[in-house]
Amino acid sequence: MKQGLISCGIILVSGILLWQFRIFQLNSRFQKLSEFDIGNGIQTQMDFDNLNFGRYLFIGFLIGTILSILIFKNRNKTVTE
């Protein structure tokens, strides 16, 4: 029971971390865009499909799954041996 909760926590935390990393990337990109003087009345915008939040969240969940498998695979070997 405890092992399942820990692995779910690892998966969720890694997904959220990669999602936050994408937000950080977008903030730095918007910061660079805001430094340019485009002119009055012109606003920078980005399409929601280009943000790729779903892709980053999925990759984070995938990394968390692989990490939890590797962590608990080694732990189970030492317990059974």
Image (spheres, rainbow, N blue to C red):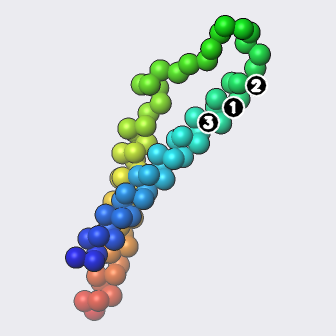
CB contact under 8 Å: marks 3 and 1 = yes
Label 2, label 3: how many angstroms apart (C-alpha)?
13 Å
Q: Would you identify the image quadrant in which residue 29 lies?
A: top right
Q: Residues within 10 Å of mark 3 (few under 14, many from 20)?
A: few
The residue type indicated by label 2 comes to Glu
Residue 57 percent location from the top left of the image: 40, 45
The residue type indicated by label 3 comes to Asn
Query: What SS does tag 2 mark?
Result: helix
Can residue 7 be spotted in the picture?
A: yes
Q: Is residue 42 above or below residue 45?
A: above
> Which mark, residue 35?
2
Residue 69 percent location from the top left of the image: 32, 67
Q: Residues within 10 Å of mark 1 (few under 14, many from 20)?
A: few
Q: Nearer the viewer, residue 2 or 77?
A: 2
Label 1, label 2: how many angstroms apart (C-alpha)?
7 Å
Question: How many tags in the picture?
Answer: 3
Label 3 belongs to which residue?
27
The residue type indicated by label 1 comes to Gln
> Which mark, residue 31?
1
Residue 81 percent location from the top left of the image: 28, 92
Query: What SS does tag 3 mark?
Result: helix
Q: Nearer the viewer, residue 24 or 63?
A: 24
Query: What SS does tag 1 mark?
Result: helix
Report the residue at 22% width, 76% height from top.
Answer: 1
Report the residue at 42% width, 59% height from top.
Answer: 13
Report the residue at 47% width, 20% height from top.
Answer: 47
